[in-house]
Image (cartoon, helix red, strand yellow):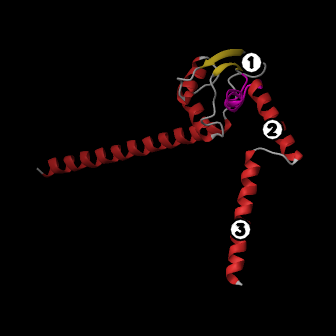
Amino acid sequence: MKLNKLVLKFVSISFSILVMLLVVIGLIKLGSFCYDFGYRVFTEGPVEEKPGTDVTVDVTGDLSEYQIGKLLKKEGLIRDANLFYVQLRMSAYHGKLKTGTYTLNTSMTAKDMMVVMAAESEESTESTESTEQRTDLDSSDGTSSDDTGADNAGEENQNTDENEQAGAVE
């Protein structure tokens, strides 16, 4: 009977040690995966060296940022869709990717692709520049848009308030 208790205790301790070893090995593997993934978020290079291969990608409005990553992976432009998604979420381009057809290259990094997909088209850039030039011309004339008129009205109200307060003090 003592022998049975001794064997049972030995098996119980052995099983506990085995479970602890599996937990430690699992934590080491998880930590290694997390470190590798985190490292790649900041250092992932292009899929191919220059000159690479041009690939045309059509980004539609119904694609989420994660789905765009999956599309780029399918086209061979990136290695990991999850990694692209995390890079995009952490970048200044999060929420700024535009729909359209893009010619991307396998020698581009994920950030390079984000820059291309978030860039304004030439037409909208030109119209923005012409609007800025008109605004600059208006303000240099002394005549400007309605905003300046609203500012002048605000100054008049402020001056009136100051005069009333000064009159009350006298």
Neighbour tally class for label 2: few under 14, some 14-19, many 20 plus, Cα within 10 Å? few
User: How far separated are the C-alphas under marks 2 and 1?
Assistant: 38 Å
Quadrant containing the C terminus in the rendered view: bottom right
Q: Which residue is labeled 3 in the image?
A: 160
Residue to which mark 1 is pinned? 52
The answer to which image quadrant residue 98 occupies is top right
On the image, the x and y values in percent for residue 136 come to 84, 42
At numbered mark 2, what does the secondary structure look like: helix, strand or loop?
A: helix
Query: What range of the chain is rendered magenta?
Result: 107-122
Could you tell me the amino acid type at mark 3? Answer: Thr
13 or 30: which is nearer to us?
30
Residue 112 position within the rendered picture, expressed as x and y whole percent measured from the top left: 72, 30
Tell me if residue 119 is in the magenta stretch.
yes
Q: Amino acid at mark 1?
A: Gly
The tag earlier along the polypeptide, 1 or 3, is 1
Residue at the far right in the pictured view: 141
Please tell me which residue is depicted at 14% across the width and 52% down the height of the picture. 2
In the picture, measured across the screen, residue 24 lies left or right of residue 84, that is left
Query: Which secondary structure type mostly characterizes the magenta part of the structure?
Result: helix
Of labels 1 and 3, the one closer to you = 3
* Up-down relation of residue 168 to residue 92 (above or below): below
Marks 2 and 3 sit apart, C-alpha to C-alpha, by 34 Å
